[in-house]
Image (spheres, grey):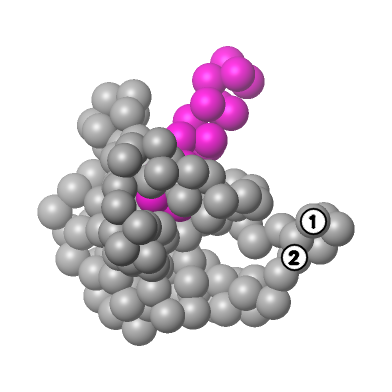
Amino acid sequence: MGRILAIDYGRKRTGIAVTDTLQIIANGLTTVPTAQLMAFLTDYIAKEVIDRVVIGLPIQMNNELSDNMANITPFVNRFKKLFPNIPVEYMDERFTSVLAHRAMIDGGLKKKDRQNKALVDEISATIILQSYMENKAMIK
């Protein structure tokens, strides 16, 4: 069994999380500059078996897609073209940044560490992945 990879796509930085090979635990992997995202993924997918990719769906409180969807759609189309055998799914990413900050506070990180936006993006990707996994478990 391969891993599930989650992406919290941002204009500047993108948080990435993955499961273990048994797809039980979600772990933050890294944050990469968005301009280098496709190169990073190409390299990572060459080394690891990825069963699917989950992308954070930027839905606003009024249930409309945010402006960032205009950046995500071309990325997803390019990804599907390069990796046609890897399914891509979307997962609602509302509140992931808030939850990431809460997790940092609960984890005892100092204020200076909590201001690390790259860490917030990585934790947000982990929350997206964990939510996806929990959602799939409830459907089974």
Residue at left 79%, top 56%? 61
Residue farthest right in this picture: 62
Q: Give the left or right position of residue 34, taking residue 89 as reference.
A: left
Q: Quadrant of residue 113?
A: bottom left
| Amino acid type of the residue tagged 1 in the rendering | Met
Please tell me whether mark 2 sits on a helix, a strand or a loop. loop
Please tell me whether mark 1 sits on a helix, a strand or a loop. loop
To which residue does mark 1 refer?
61
To which residue does mark 2 refer?
65
Q: Could one spot residue 101 in this view of the protein?
A: yes
Residue at left 38%, top 65%? 115
- How many residues crowd mark 2 within 10 Å: few (<14), some (14–19), many (20+)? few
Pick the front one: 137 or 81: 137
Q: Give the left or right position of residue 106, taking residue 42 as reference.
A: right
Pick the front one: 90 or 62: 62
| Amino acid type of the residue tagged 2 in the rendering | Leu
- How many residues crowd mark 1 within 10 Å: few (<14), some (14–19), many (20+)? few
Report, in whole angstroms, how far the alpha carbon at label 1 lies from the one at label 2. 9 Å
Span of residues in magenta: 123-140
Q: Is residue 85 above or below residue 20?
A: below
Q: Quadrant of the C terminus?
A: top right
Q: Is residue 121 above or below residue 1?
A: below
